[in-house]
Every structure is written in C-alpha cells, then in structure tokens.
Image: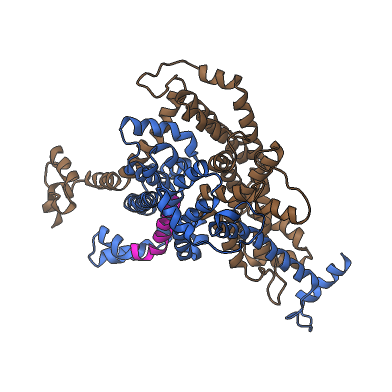
C-alpha cells in the first residue's frame, strides 16, 4: 500500500522519469486478467462454431477439438428440416417490420422533436412505458387478438407485432437525434422557398441519416432475434421464424447438437454483418436519450 | 393591401373540413387567412404524423394489455365463451405451489441479477474509461484496446436469446459441456448443472443473464462516465484520491441517475428471463414465472395465464417504483 501511494505522485507529477515503457507487474496482471476475461466471454461462440462442425460420432466426447471438421452438417440440416422456410420467414418479418417502423416512427419522431404540442411529454412517456411492458405478460392478449382476426401463423402478424414492439425504441432514438439538428437549417431552406416537407426530406433527413440507420438496423436485429411472439403466434413449423425453428431442434433432436449449432451459425451471420456496420454508432445511439 | 384578402364573414365550417382533408395548396384563401386556420394546421400535422403510431400502440400494445386485465378475471380456455369468475384465478394462483416455486425463483433473479450485472458492468466500464496507466497530462485514461472490449462484451446483446440459451445449454451440458470438460481435465467430476440441484440451476441462469446483459451496461456506463468533465477527476487526483476513492466518491454519485435507470431496466429483464429458462432448462428443472405462465397457456388455461401475466406486470411496476424511490436526492448538474 505504501509503495503504491509513494509511486503515484511520481507518475502523475512533473517527474523527469518518463513512464512511457514502464511495464509494472500490476499493469501486466491487469492486462492478463482483462484478456482472460475477454476470452471467457468469447468461449461460448467458439464452442458454438466447433460444435456446428463436429462429426456426429464425436458429439458426446469431452475433447475440445474434434478430429476433423464436418462441413456437411450445414448441408444436412438444410435438407432435413424446415430451416429454409424458417430463414425466409425471418427475413420477411425482420425486413417488413423494419420498413414499417421507418414509415411510422420517422414522421412521429420528426414531429415530436420539432413541434411543441400539447401532450408531447405524455407521448414520450407512453413510448417509455410501453418499452417497459414485458412481452410475456402481453402474450395471451395478443394471441387472443390475432386468434379473433384469424391471423395466427400469418407472416403479417409477426411483422406487425415486431414493428409495434420496436416502435418505442425507434421513436425515442430518432426524436433525440433529430432534436440535436438545429431547426435553423430547415428555416433557412424554407425561407429559400422549400415546403416544410421538402425541408424535412432534403435537409434534416440526410443529416439524421446515421441515427436513422442505427434505429433501423437495431429494429432489424431485434425482429430477427425475436422469440416469444414467434413461439406463441405461430404453430406450424414452416411459418415459424428461425429462432423458434432452432428451439424445435432442441425438442426433436436433443442429441444432435451439431444441427442446432449449424442452424444457429446461419442465424447469427446476418446479425454479425449488420452489427459491424452500426458498431460505432451503438454508444451514441443507445445513450442518446438516457445520458443527460 | 393584404386586408383585401380577408373576407368580412368567417368561412363556413364545411370549408374548414374540406381544407383539413385536401393537400395544403388547395386550401381556399378565405380559410387560409382565418384565425382558426393555425389550429387546423396544427391538428392536421398531429393527425398525419402521430395518429398512425398512436393507433399502432392502441391496437397492438395497449389493447392486448387491457384485454389481458379483463381475461384475468374469466375462465376463458380458447373457446367462444369466457365467463366472468371474479378473483378465482388469483385465489387459484395463491394456492398453487408451482406458482410460488417459480415466483420465488423469479424474485431471486429480480433481486440478485441486477446487482451482479450492474456491479460487473460498472467495474468494466470504470476499467475501460479510467483503468489505464496514468499518462502525463491526462488525469484518467482507459485501458489499451478499450473499444475492442466494448464490442466483445456488447455482442451477446445483439444475439437472439434463443441462441444464447441453446449455446449455454451446451456449455452447461453434464456430459459434453465446456465446463464439465474443463473440470474433468482437472480430475473433478462435474455436477449436473441444469437438471440437478436447484442452487446450481440458479447459478447457471444468473451466469447466462449476466453474460448477455453486462455488455449493455458497460457501454451505457462508460458513456455516462465519459460525459463527466475531465477536470472533476483531475481535481480528485490532485487531492490525492486513489482510483477506488475516486470511483466511490466522485464517479458513482455523478452517474447515479444512469445507474438507477439501468437497475430498473435490468430488473424487468431478469423478471422476464423467459426464453433463457424455457430453452436452456430441461422440462422438469427450475422454472420462472413467465415459463409457468407459458405452460398454462399451452395447456389452454388462457384465463389463468393472463392472471399470472397481470401479477408479473404488477411485480415489475412495484419493483420500478421501489428503485425510483431509492436514493432519490437532488440531481447533480455538471
């Protein structure tokens, strides 16, 4: 303890000794610990990829690496299950709800950011409160609603529910983002003769594009990953999204982990690609409404 | 000159209605220069821009919610009839041992998961923003490669919970799992993590919840810590405060609001750990309230299931209110 307190002023004060390459044991220890922890966080992914490539006979082995990689697992899971249809459903649902959220959330966010209307606070509160509802508590109510409409197993059901559940987050982020763009820019465009709509499309939207893209990719990823709604609102295996399809493997082929993980890898690939695009915006986008 | 355009009599109400439906360029002059046109213009905007999202909320979020409250008091089982039975479902729940078992688990998760996840998240965030070596001229510095760590921790957040549950189901597998494999190579026979003892199953669930959510809080808290002006940390350092003191006396009080929001959000997530438990746990093992609800739903006891849903919602509201009250002091502005 004494050495630590004695050492501190030296490294921070105007000491002539340069601390540039001073690798102290404590620094090394912390670095090693951090890397170890990161490895611990990454281990499950590795396990997933390795199991996806494991030959069937070695699934119950305790070796960490299989004797050979079995790439045909991916082809077999494709042939033997409804994975193809599930993938199609997931793509349509995620794409459709993203489009719907764009059409609905953008005008609402624009209006909320720009206008001081009565009930503005209430609207934002509603957005926050609906964000806090657990989907599980709404399951039966939603099931009842779509049952009455005769829309169970329909792809529109999943598109609409996913859009409704992601609307809150999109409106919240977009309101914060558009609100940070000075309204004077639009006023200048309107003085120059553009309509309000034109100012919104040609001036504000291009400036808000990073925020819009973040909100949309987030909607896509959440809809793509959605599980509880897909599980309850669909009953036929071919009309279920990918996440529910993977869950079906757990019941049907409890031992065939290689198929489950081959399907999981397929489900993760689009998420990895999209996340790589917005990774830089995640911090600013996520915290737009919550920090300060 | 402009006064010429204003008619002596105000325009007819029908003209207003027509102007409300037609695009703005067709608005008659007499209406456009009326005092009431401003109000009309305002509400037309509201109708166009806000009505659709509000309708969405009404039909797909608020309505199922209200229906759920109503059906909680009925014996609806999927057919056309739903008899009003008062509080029978809630009485049944009170006497149902399985409900209490699952709810005790859920409440344990509600209390423990936020504390563990937030403490870990805060520790990592502090390490990332202020854990690095002191360099000259900088009061605080992050560890090397901090953005990489953020991505690594955050990534589970963008994975489907179903996949997270499947992967961890394999990791905790008694025979071929990663953990028991490691224990085996050390000469220890690994226990049955998921289907065996209750305590082990609880630890396994907590591990998965922490793993998948901690990254979100690392990102959230490091953003909040990054927003604190550097001179505050500098002042603390000049006064001779170490890293620990700086964290507890300076950083933590300044990000208290963010921590509280995160705590509420995490509690609700822990209470709703539906997919993780449903997919990862074997059917006979530990259950949480949402899984218990889902099982009743699958059995066709829709009225009972909605009643459980209402209790679940009440629990999360009570939890949020309690946390909002905790340490509710004046906000520190900087």
Does residue A75 show up magenta in the picture?
A: no
Number of marks drawn = 0
Q: Assign the N terminus of chain B to one quadrant of the image.
A: bottom left
**Where in the figure is residue B288, as x and y percent of width and height?**
59, 35
Residue lying farthest bottom?
A: A16
Tell me, by letter, which chain the rendering colours blue.
A
Horizontal and vertical percent position of residue B217: 60, 54
Q: Residue at left 76%, top 58%?
A: B245
Looking at the image, residue A93 lies above or below residue B65: below
Judged left or right of residue A263, residue B251 is: right
Could you say which quadrant of the image residue A65 lies in? bottom right
Q: Is residue A250 placed above or below B288 in the rendered structure?
A: below
Q: Residues in magenta?
A: A204-222
Residue at the spot x=69%, y=76% of the render?
B137
Chain depicted in brown: B
The reply, left or right, for residue A135 in relation to residue B167 is left
Q: Nearer the viewer, residue B125 or A113?
A: B125
A248 displayed left or right of A45: left
Residue closest to the eye, B252 or B85: B85
Instruction: Give the quadrant of the C terminus of chain B.
Output: bottom right
Instruction: Provide residue B279's location: percent of width, then percent of height.
Output: 54, 42
Q: Is residue A212 magenta?
A: yes
Looking at the picture, tell me which residue is in the foreground, A26 or A271: A271
Residue A138 seen in the figure: yes
Q: How far across and down, in percent of the image, does residue B224 sit?
A: 59, 58
């Amino acid at each position: 303890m004494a050495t630590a307190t004695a050492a501190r002023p030296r490294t921070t004060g105007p000491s002539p000794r340069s601390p540039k390459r001073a690798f102290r044991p404590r620094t090394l220890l912390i670095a090693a610990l951090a890397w170890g922890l990161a490895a611990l966080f990454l281990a499950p992914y590795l396990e997933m990829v390795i199991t996806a490539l494991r030959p069937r006979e070695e699934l119950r082995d305790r070796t960490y690496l299989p004797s050979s990689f079995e790439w045909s697992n991916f082809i077999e899971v494709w042939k033997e299950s409804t994975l193809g249809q599930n993938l199609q459903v997931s793509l349509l649902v995620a794409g459709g709800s993203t489009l719907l959220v764009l059409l609905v959330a953008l005008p609402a966010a624009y209006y909320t950011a720009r206008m001081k209307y009565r009930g503005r606070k209430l609207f934002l509160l509603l957005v926050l409160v609906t964000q806090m509802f657990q989907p599980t508590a709404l399951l039966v109510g939603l099931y009842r609603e779509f049952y009455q409409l005769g829309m169970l197993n329909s792809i529109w059901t999943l598109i609409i529910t996913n859009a409704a559940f992601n609307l809150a987050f999109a409106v919240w982020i977009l309101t914060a983002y558009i609100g940070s763009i000075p309204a004077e820019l639009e006023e200048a465009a309107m003085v120059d003769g553009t309509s309000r709509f034109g100012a919104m499309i040609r001036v504000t939207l291009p400036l808000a594009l990073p925020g819009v893209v973040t909100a949309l990719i987030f909607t896509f990823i959440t809809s793509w990953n959605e599980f509880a709604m897909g599980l309850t609102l669909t009953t036929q295996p071919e009309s279920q999204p990918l996440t529910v399809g993977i869950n079906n493997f757990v019941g049907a082929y409890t031992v065939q982990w290689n198929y489950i993980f081959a399907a999981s890898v397929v489900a993760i690939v689009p998420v990895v690609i999209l996340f790589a695009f917005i990774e830089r915006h995640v911090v600013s986008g996520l915290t737009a409404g919550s920090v300060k | 000159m402009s006064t010429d355009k204003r008619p002596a009599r105000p325009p007819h109400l029908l003209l207003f209605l027509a102007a409300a439906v037609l695009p703005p360029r067709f608005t008659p002059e007499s209406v456009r220069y009326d005092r009431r046109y401003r109000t009309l213009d305002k509400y037309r905007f509201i109708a166009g821009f806000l009505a659709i999202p509000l309708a969405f909320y009404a039909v797909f979020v608020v309505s199922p919610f209200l229906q759920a409250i109503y059906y909680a008091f009925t014996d609806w089982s999927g057919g056309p009839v739903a008899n009003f039975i008062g509080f029978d479902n809630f009485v049944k729940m009170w006497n149902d041992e399985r409900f209490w078992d699952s709810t005790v688990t859920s409440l344990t998760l509600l209390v423990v998961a936020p504390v563990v996840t937030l403490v870990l998240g805060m520790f990592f965030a502090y390490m990332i923003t202020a854990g690095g070596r002191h360099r000259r001229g900088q009061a605080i510095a992050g560890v090397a490669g901090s953005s990489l760590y953020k991505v690594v921790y955050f990534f589970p957040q963008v994975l489907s919970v179903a996949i997270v549950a499947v992967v961890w189901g394999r990791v905790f597998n008694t025979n071929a799992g990663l953990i028991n494999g490691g224990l085996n190579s050390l000469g220890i026979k690994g226990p049955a993590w998921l289907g065996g003892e209750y305590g082990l199953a609880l630890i396994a669930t907590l591990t998965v919840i922490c793993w998948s959510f901690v990254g979100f809080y690392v990102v959230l808290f490091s953003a909040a810590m990054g927003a604190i002006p550097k001179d505050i940390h500098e002042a603390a350092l000049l006064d001779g405060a170490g890293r620990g003191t700086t964290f507890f006396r300076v950083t933590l009080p300044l990000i208290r609001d963010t921590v509280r929001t995160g705590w509420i959000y995490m509690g609700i997530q822990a209470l709703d750990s539906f997919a993780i438990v449903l997919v990862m746990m074997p059917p006979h093992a530990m259950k949480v309230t949402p899984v218990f609800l889902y099982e009743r739903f699958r059995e066709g006891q829709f009225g009972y299931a909605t009643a459980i849903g209402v209790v679940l919602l009440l629990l999360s509201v009570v939890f949020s209110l309690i946390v909002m009250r905790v340490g509710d002091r004046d906000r520190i502005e900087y």
